[in-house]
Image (spheres, rainbow, N blue to C red):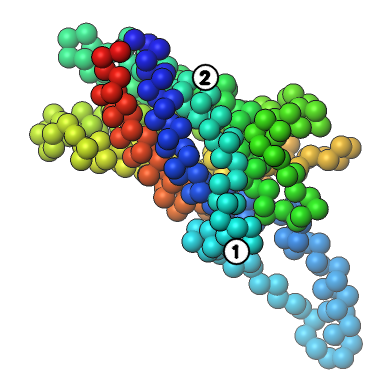
């Protein structure tokens, strides 16, 4: 019975992950916007030239200050259009092989473990589990799943972000296996678990908020008689669960994306020394709301992902109920 929960969760997760991959890619690109160490974006690199120009201008009586306008805020639709224009439609599926591997490792583990814990911790008479236990089960399952799937997560972030780099600096991974192999050889095995603490924290938050809220909302809808157990209930509960998960996880997701994507050159200090350093630098340079960069595509992706995940899961359960 326990193994079936892993199979059902794995199938549903892979379907949901692949179908919403373009939205996830747009989210990653938006979360990386504004990083101060990205080529051609660091304003401080321009200051010497402006200082020279302003000094020259002062000599002829022109104003001595130069206003550098902030970069325009770009929305998810604009980001998507620019990706297609610059890299082609297929670029929206950059890193999809890593998504498949990530869902196979991470989501299969978390969904299966949550199912096992739910069976063990549910009330034997009513079959229901208190909300506190649901959250605890989600935290445990999400943390273990993230630790297992972190290498695929790092590969996915890098493959999704590659197109925004100058052509000479792109990693050009041929697929998830090539990415993991090259990272291991060039940066060491430990690089596969870069940002793992963040991945684990995010996964615990997402799994606890997503799975626990889905079960709780679904149970409430059925108990109150608002709807019967069917597609409408599954869609309503899953979309609400996706919104809760997006709000709870976005700040950790932004930091995770930046730490995983950073390029560490031999003999030079990394852009971020860790998660806290990344968070502090991000907030100082871009303001507190930078931690909610990519929130629109996050909710745009988390909502459909959660709907597809749970609707597919319910259908797979029906198909496999006799096995």
**Location of residue 272 by image quarter:** top right
Residue neighbourhood size for the residue with mark 1, other residues' Cα within 10 Å, grouped as few (<14), some (14–19), many (≥20): few
Tell me the residue at 61%/38% (across/down).
156
Element type at marker 2? helix
Element type at marker 1? helix
Residue receiving disc 2 = 144
Q: Nearer the viewer, residue 109 or 68?
A: 109
Q: Residue furthest left?
A: 225
Q: How far apart, in angstroms, are the residues tagged by discs 2 and 1? A: 39 Å
Residue receiving disc 1 = 85
Q: Is residue 149 left or right of residue 171?
A: left
**Residue 278: image x %, image y %?**
66, 42
Q: Nearer the viewer, residue 115 or 194?
A: 115
Q: Nearer the viewer, residue 8 or 222?
A: 8
**Location of residue 95 by image quarter:** top right
**Residue 52: image x %, image y %?**
88, 75
Locate the N terminus by quadrant: top left
Nearest to the eye among marks 2 and 1: give it: 1
Identify whether 239 is placed above or below 29. above
Along the polypeptide, which appears first: circle 2 or circle 1?
1
Tell me the residue at 58%/51% (across/down).
90
Instruction: Tell me, yes or no, if residue 57 can be seen here.
Output: yes
**Residue 30: image x %, image y %?**
57, 53
**Residue 20: image x %, image y %?**
45, 44
Tell me the residue at 71%/40% (across/down).
173
Q: Is residue 43 left or right of residue 299?
A: right
Instruction: Tell me, yes or no, if residue 131 can be seen here.
Output: no
Residue neighbourhood size for the residue with mark 2, other residues' Cα within 10 Å, grouped as few (<14), some (14–19), many (≥20): some
Tell me the residue at 51%/26% (across/down).
104
């Amino acid at each position: 019975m326990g193994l079936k929960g892993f199979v059902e969760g794995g199938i549903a997760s892979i379907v949901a992950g692949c179908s919403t991959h373009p939205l996830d890619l747009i989210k990653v690109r938006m979360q990386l916007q504004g990083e101060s160490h990205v080529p051609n974006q660091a304003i401080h690199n321009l200051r010497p030239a402006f200082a020279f120009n302003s000094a020259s201008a002062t000599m002829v009586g022109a104003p001595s200050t130069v206003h550098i306008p902030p970069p325009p805020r770009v929305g998810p639709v604009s980001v998507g259009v620019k990706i297609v224009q610059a890299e082609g439609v297929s670029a929206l599926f950059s890193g999809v092989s890593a998504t498949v591997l990530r869902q196979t490792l991470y989501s299969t583990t978390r969904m299966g473990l949550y199912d096992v814990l739910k069976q063990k911790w549910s009330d034997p008479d009513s079959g229901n589990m208190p909300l506190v236990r649901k959250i605890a089960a989600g935290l445990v399952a999400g943390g273990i799943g993230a630790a297992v799937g972190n290498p695929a997560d790092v590969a996915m972030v890098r493959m999704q972000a590659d197109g925004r780099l100058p052509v000479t600096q792109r990693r050009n991974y041929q697929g998830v296996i090539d990415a993991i192999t090259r990272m291991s050889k060039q940066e060491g095995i430990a690089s596969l678990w870069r940002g793992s603490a963040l991945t684990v924290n995010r996964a615990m938050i997402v799994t606890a908020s997503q799975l626990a809220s889905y079960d709780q909302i679904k149970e409430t809808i059925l108990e109150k008689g608002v709807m019967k157990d069917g597609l409408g209930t599954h869609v309503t509960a899953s979309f609400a669960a996706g919104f809760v998960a997006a709000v709870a996880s976005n700040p950790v997701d932004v930091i995770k994306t930046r730490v995983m994507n950073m390029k560490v050159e031999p003999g030079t200090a990394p852009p971020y020394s860790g998660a806290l350093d990344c968070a502090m630098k991000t907030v100082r340079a871009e303001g507190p709301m930078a931690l909610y960069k990519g929130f629109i595509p996050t909710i745009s992706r988390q909502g459909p992902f959660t709907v597809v995940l749970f609707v597919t899961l319910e259908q797979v359960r029906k198909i496999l109920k006799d096995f």
